[in-house]
Structures are given as structure tokens and as C-alpha cells.
């Protein structure tokens, strides 16, 4: 057997199905040269709970499937497959990839013709058609790491000294000897692995490809970067990379590598640099996330304060203190900022900072907040009640300011002032007319806020009429003519080669590309496997959606405050009053939520479910009987995360209210 394709999967069934379909097409092309049974596909599943195993069994019966009962990590899972693989070459392939039809045969031919090649990597592009620099990398020596950590490699990417991490001085369109290959698509010669050994299982995730690439060089072989075939790798600007957890996991893998391969002195230097990088990157990640969260509200609050300060100055000189005098400092520096804070928080809780922006949410938030301010105002001592007029006029000013800031931001991005028009994506479906209609049906059934402009077909054989607006070769022009923000390719009709060609040709930051696999009720894209909102899937109401997070938080607060109010009556039924009160207060301050995943699914290392606070109860508590089977608990957690409803939380809380003295899970 010539080739064994090895894919390790963990809860990415949609991506895995698309990857397997592209791999099977590539193998069918190989068979024309090397004959039947020249290649095999081995999938190792690390305890997925999203139906991956069932999907492979049903849709890909010829695939060899290893279904692990727990998540044993990337390295160990790949080793499982390599120990049973029959091919002369092994291709380690990520499930979040799509390969061209000719990828496998071209890689195999290169390895056949290049006897000193121990490993081979290809040109990778992200979901927007942009070249991924990790397609070719240099060895992360202490100095290379130093240049990367402190940004010199980013400042001078083409420098032979500073740009060695991604070898930016080497053309991405020419074949080169390189030091490090990417584990996302890495072809290995079996006889080379017999000398080097398999992946080092000390690396749970990240770093194992660097370690193996280096050992291949030490064994006397060479690693090559081969750009004459391409793959899509849904990685790109993954939001996960900005998380603190990613920073620690990735850079700690680098420390393991340094201790293993560098001299003791160099290893200490490398480890020291890496530890500095960990704290710098972690701090930067926290600052970035904090800034993104507060930047818009802070802008609104600053403009509102300046406006109301001007109103206050006008009012005191022309109405309140005509004969002289002014408002005391407590009004200017305490009460006015407090009013603005209440307005901003009210708008936030009513969804005024969510996209698409809606004037109704802003109006509702300002109105409710104004009522709260007026109620609080009436309860203040006479000495602190300065002016209802400023509150009412200020509310109108805040409303106008919030609407204007959103209109300006919206206009800068979309060149129009209609929230609905700018936020409804304009998309084109590319494929045969029949398949385009099927995909349009999938999109319509998800109630997605999109405008389908029309179809781009492979070939126009009759008089063109709507919804057909052009052919595939005209996509770049169609994007400009119709101001399109998204293109969906029909995987059944459009080959990965054409898809990548078009993505690379158009390649704009404001264009999303998605792929609809044949006979599937989902659409994959556009840039990252870890970004939310990239799948059109039927009837999904995921817990990570801003509206659900907000509703969940408001329900938590309401229930906690109600329980505290009723606590004198409940105490006679509560076995642990102190724990009961502690849980209520922890929910109020945001340390806990009433309902969350089980203990097994709540850790930071788990990335298959959206991150939420630890809880008092779990979805399994909805059952009248005790649920202890781990797989059942996992599935209940997944259903809870995928189709969240406040009613679900309320039902679980009411059923278990008298046991709310339990410690948080």
C-alpha cells in the first residue's frame, strides 16, 4: 500500500465529514495511477460527543475507525493509527482541512522522486484564501524564539536574521528545504519513522510536529515545503489564539521541546524567554479582551458625560442659578456619572451593544434605565435631588448619542445608515443550479439574516435569468458589482482546486467563504474552526449567543434575589443554610451560575463546549432519576449548550430548589 491518511478528530463532525469527502476524491485520483487499494484512511476519534463516530460509520464505511473511550491527546492518537497503518507513507491530516483532488498524488510523487525527503508539507491557506505562514517554519532556537516573542519577526518578516520563525525570506510559491513542518498536513516516510520513532507523547497538544520535524533532520533526512498543491486549513485568526489558556498550552509545549533538544544552558535561556512570553502574551490577551468589551461603552459614556456636563452648565446659568452659584461637585462628579452608568448598563442588558444594532433595544434600555434613575432620585435626600429636568433631557441626549455613534460606526463599515441592510449579509451561491437551490433551502430554513443575491454556475448553457447571475469565472466581478460579503461553494459541483483558486483570487478581509458539502444539511466556513457563528445548522440556539448569555445572567440574578428574599421561609427546609446563602451571593456577584455543565465538562482544558461559569446544578438534574453514565451526562451537556432556553434553567432550578444548599459543581 502506498499511503495511509491519518486523521485525529475531537468534536468537529462537520469539518471531519468535509475533510473525508475531499480525501476520498483525492484517493480516487491516486487509484488511476497506483491502482485500487493504494491508500487507506484511518480516523482516530478522541471521545467526541457530537456524533462524529456515528457519522463516520454511516457515511464512510471504508474508513478504518478507532473510537477511543477518552481523550488521549493528539500525539498518542496519531501513534495509535501509525502503528497499524499499512502505507509506505503516512499523511497526518487535521480534520479542519480540505485538500485538492491532486494533493495526495502530487505529494506521493514528490516523495517517490526525492529519496532524502523524510517529511513533506504543502501550501496552506485559511478560510479566506490567505497564505498561512506556518506552512513553512524554521527551528525555534533561543534567538529565533526571542525575535518571535518580542515582535522583531513581525517587523522584519523578510529578514534572514529576524524572519526565521516563518522563513519569510523564502518564496511561498517555490519548493524549499525547511526545518519545521506543520502537523495539520504532514507527509512522513515510514522508513524514516522507523529510525526517528513516532510522535513524542509528552506533547498532549502543540509542539509535537516541531519535535518530530527536528528528529527527522537529526536522522539525516530533509523536510520540504511543497507549494504545488494546496489545502484549506480552517485556522487563520482563530479567536482561541487570544485566550490565556492557549498561550499557556502552546508556550509550555515549547519549553518541553527546549528541555529535550537544547543544551542545558541554552534550554534555560529558552525556558526563561518562553516564560516571559507566556506572561506578556497572557497579559496582552487579557487587555485585548477587556478593551474589546469596554471600548464602545466607554466611548458612549465619555460622549454622554461631555454632553450632559454641557447641559448642566447651561441649566445652572440659565435656569437654576440665574443670580449666581452652581451645582455642587457631588452632582457633577458623582451623580451625573452614576446616571450615565445606569443608562449604559441598561442599554447593555437590553442588547444595545449586540450586532446587528437595533434602535428598539437602545430605546428600551434608555427608557427602563431612566425609570430606575427617577425612582432612585425620589428616594434620595432633598439635598441630593438637584434636577429632574436634567435627568429627562439627559436621557433624550443619551438616546440620541447612542443612536448616532452606531449610525456613524455602521456607515464607516457598510456605507449606509440602515442597520438591517448593512448587517444582512449579501451572498452568492456557487455551483449547479439544482445544488444551489438545495443550499438556498438550507439557509432559508435556518432563518439566517442574509440576502441571497443569486447563483454563480459552472457554465451557462441557456439564456441567463435570475437567480443565475453569472458563471464561476466571473465571481470576482460579481462580488464587486453586487457588493457581496459572502460566497458559498457547493462542494458537490465545485472542486477544492477551483474553490481555493477563487478564494485566493478574491482574497479580501471583508469577504467570507463557505463550503456546503454534498448531501449535508450544514455549511462550513469561513476562517476558523474555533469561531462561533460559522455554520448554518438547523434549529440551533447555542448558549454562547450574546442574547442567551444576557438572558441567562438576568435569570440568575432574578432567582438569586428572590431566594434571598424568601430565605426566612426556606431555611426550615434547607439542610445547609450557610451554603445556601453562599451560593446565592456567588451567583449575584457572577462567580457562579445556577445551571452549568457537569464537573467533567467545566474545566479550562475542555474546548468542545462554550465557556460558561461553573454552576450549582447541571442539565442532568432535570431528570427525576440519577444520571451517572458519563456518556449520557456528556450528551445532556451538549444538548444544553446547543439549544439553550431560559425555560430549561428555570425548570432545573425549580426541580432542585430545596437542594440548592449543595456546593457548586
Image (cartoon, rainbow, N blue to C red):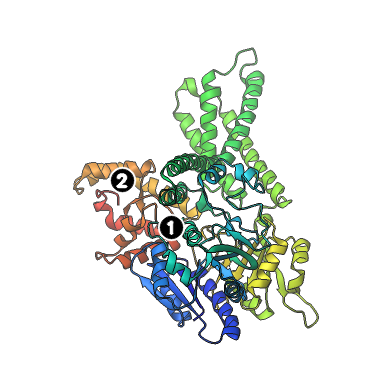
Q: Residues within 10 Å of mark 1 (few under 14, many from 20)?
A: some
Which quarter of the picture shows residue 471?
bottom right
- In the picture as drawn, the residue positioned furthest to the front comes out as 220
Q: Which of marks 2 and 1 is in front?
A: 1
Tell me where residue 194 appears, x and y as whole percent: 43, 69
Q: Which residue is drawn at 39% across and 51% down?
A: 604
Disc 2: CA contacts within 10 A as few (<14), some (14-19) or many (>=20): some
Task: Name the one closer to the observer, 200 or 411.
Answer: 200
* Residue under the image location 22 percent in, 43 percent down: 577
Contact between labelled residues 1 and 2, with CB atoms less than 8 Å apart: no
The circle on residue 20 is none
SS at mark 2? helix
* 205 versus 258 height, above or below: below
Along the line of sight, which residue is nearer the eye, 463 or 303?
463
> Circle 1 — which element?
loop
Left or right position of 450 against 43? right
Q: Nearer the viewer, residue 78 or 367?
A: 78
Q: In this view, does 456 lie above or below 413?
A: below
How far apart are the two marked residues, 2 and 1, measured between alpha carbons? 44 Å
Q: In this view, does 612 lie to the left or right of 464?
A: left
Image position, residue 274 (x, y; %) = 47, 43
Q: Residue at x 36, y 63 (%)?
A: 72
Q: Name the residue under label 2.
A: 563
Q: Mark 1 points at which residue?
A: 205
Which of the marked residues, 2 or 1, is nearer the chain's N terminus? 1
List the single residue furthest toward the right: 463
**Residue nearest the observer in this picture, 128 or 425:** 128
User: At which x and y percent is residue 447?
Assistant: 57, 66
Q: Is residue 543 visible?
A: no
Count of numbered circles on the image: 2
Amino acid at each position: 500500500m502506498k499511503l495511509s491518511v491519518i486523521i485525529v478528530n475531537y468534536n468537529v463532525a462537520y469539518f471531519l465529514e468535509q475533510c473525508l469527502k475531499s480525501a476520498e476524491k483525492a484517493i480516487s485520483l491516486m487509484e488511476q495511477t497506483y491502482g485500487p487499494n493504494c491508500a487507506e484512511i484511518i480516523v482516530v476519534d478522541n471521545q467526541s460527543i457530537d456524533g462524529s463516530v456515528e457519522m463516520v460509520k454511516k457515511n464512510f464505511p471504508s474508513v478504518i475507525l478507532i473510537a477511543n473511550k477518552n481523550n488521549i491527546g493528539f500525539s498518542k492518537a496519531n501513534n495509535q493509527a501509525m502503528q497499524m497503518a499499512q502505507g509506505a507513507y503516512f499523511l497526518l491530516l487535521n480534520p479542519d482541512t480540505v485538500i485538492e483532488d491532486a494533493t495526495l498524488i502530487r505529494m506521493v510523487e514528490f516523495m517517490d522522486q526525492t529519496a532524502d525527503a523524510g517529511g513533506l508539507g504543502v501550501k496552506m491557506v485559511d478560510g479566506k484564501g490567505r497564505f498561512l505562514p506556518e506552512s513553512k517554519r524554521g527551528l525555534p532556537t533561543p534567538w529565533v524564539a526571542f525575535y518571535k516573542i518580542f515582535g522583531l519577526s513581525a517587523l522584519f518578516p523578510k529578514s534572514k536574521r529576524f524572519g526565521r520563525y516563518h522563513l519569510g525570506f523564502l518564496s511561498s510559491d517555490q519548493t524549499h528545504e525547511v526545518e519545521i513542518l506543520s502537523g495539520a498536513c504532514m507527509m512522513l516516510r515510514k522508513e524514516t519513522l522507523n529510525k526517528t520513532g513516532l510522535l513524542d507523547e509528552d506533547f498532549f497538544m502543540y509542539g509535537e510536529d516541531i519535535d518530530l520535524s527536528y528528529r527527522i533532520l537529526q536522522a539525516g533526512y530533509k523536510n520540504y515545503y511543497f507549494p504545488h498543491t494546496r489545502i484549506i486549513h480552517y485556522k487563520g485568526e482563530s479567536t482561541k489564539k487570544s485566550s490565556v489558556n492557549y498561550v499557556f498550552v502552546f508556550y509550555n509545549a515549547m519549553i518541553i521541546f527546549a528541555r529535550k533538544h537544547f543544551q542545558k544552558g541554552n534550554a534555560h535561556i529558552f525556558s526563561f524567554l518562553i516564560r516571559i512570553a507566556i506572561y506578556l502574551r497572557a497579559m496582552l490577551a487579557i487587555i485585548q479582551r477587556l478593551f474589546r468589551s469596554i471600548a464602545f461603552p466607554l466611548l458612549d459614556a465619555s460622549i454622554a458625560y461631555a454632553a450632559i456636563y454641557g447641559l448642566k452648565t447651561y441649566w445652572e446659568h440659565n435656569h437654576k442659578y440665574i443670580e449666581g452659584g452652581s451645582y455642587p461637585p457631588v452632582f457633577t462628579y458623582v451623580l451625573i456619572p452614576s446616571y450615565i452608568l445606569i443608562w449604559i448598563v441598561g442599554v447593555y442588558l437590553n442588547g444595545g451593544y449586540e450586532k446587528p444594532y437595533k434602535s428598539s433595544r437602545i430605546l428600551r434600555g434608555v427608557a427602563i434605565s431612566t425609570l430606575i434613575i427617577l425612582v432612585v432620585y425620589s428616594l434620595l435626600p432633598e439635598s441630593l435631588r438637584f434636577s429632574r429636568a436634567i435627568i429627562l433631557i439627559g436621557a433624550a441626549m443619551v438616546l440620541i448619542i447612542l443612536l448616532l455613534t452606531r449610525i456613524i460606526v455602521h456607515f464607516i463599515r457598510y456605507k449606509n445608515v440602515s442597520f438591517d441592510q448593512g448587517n444582512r449579509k449579501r451572498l452568492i451561491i456557487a455551483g449547479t443550479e439544482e445544488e444551489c437551490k438545495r443550499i438556498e433551502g438550507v439557509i432559508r430554513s435556518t432563518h439566517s439574516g442574509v440576502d441571497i443575491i443569486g447563483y454563480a454556475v459552472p457554465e451557462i448553457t441557456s439564456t441567463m435569468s435570475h437567480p443565475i447571475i453569472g458563471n464561476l469565472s466571473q465571481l470576482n466581478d460579481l462580488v464587486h458589482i453586487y457588493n457581496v460579503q459572502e460566497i458559498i461553494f457547493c462542494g458537490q459541483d465545485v472542486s477544492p482546486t477551483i474553490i481555493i483558486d477563487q478564494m485566493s483570487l478574491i482574497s479580501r478581509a471583508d469577504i467570507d467563504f463557505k463550503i456546503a458539502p454534498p448531501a449535508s444539511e450544514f455549511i462550513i466556513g469561513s476562517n476558523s474552526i474555533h469561531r462561533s457563528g460559522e455554520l448554518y445548522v438547523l434549529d440551533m440556539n447555542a448558549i454562547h449567543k450574546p442574547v442567551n448569555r444576557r438572558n441567562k445572567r438576568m435569570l440568575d440574578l432574578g432567582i438569586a434575589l428572590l431566594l434571598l428574599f424568601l430565605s426566612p421561609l426556606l431555611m426550615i427546609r434547607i439542610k445547609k443554610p450557610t451554603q445556601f446563602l453562599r451560593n446565592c451571593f456567588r451567583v449575584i456577584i457572577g462567580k457562579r451560575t445556577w445551571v452549568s455543565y457537569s464537573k467533567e465538562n467545566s474545566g479550562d482544558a475542555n474546548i468542545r463546549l462554550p465557556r460558561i461559569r461553573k454552576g450549582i446544578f447541571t442539565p442532568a438534574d432535570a431528570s427525576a432519576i440519577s444520571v451517572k453514565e458519563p456518556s449520557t451526562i456528556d450528551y445532556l451537556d451538549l444538548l444544553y449548550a446547543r439549544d439553550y432556553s431560559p425555560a430549561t434553567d428555570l425548570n432545573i432550578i425549580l426541580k432542585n430548589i430545596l437542594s440548592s444548599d449543595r456546593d457548586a459543581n
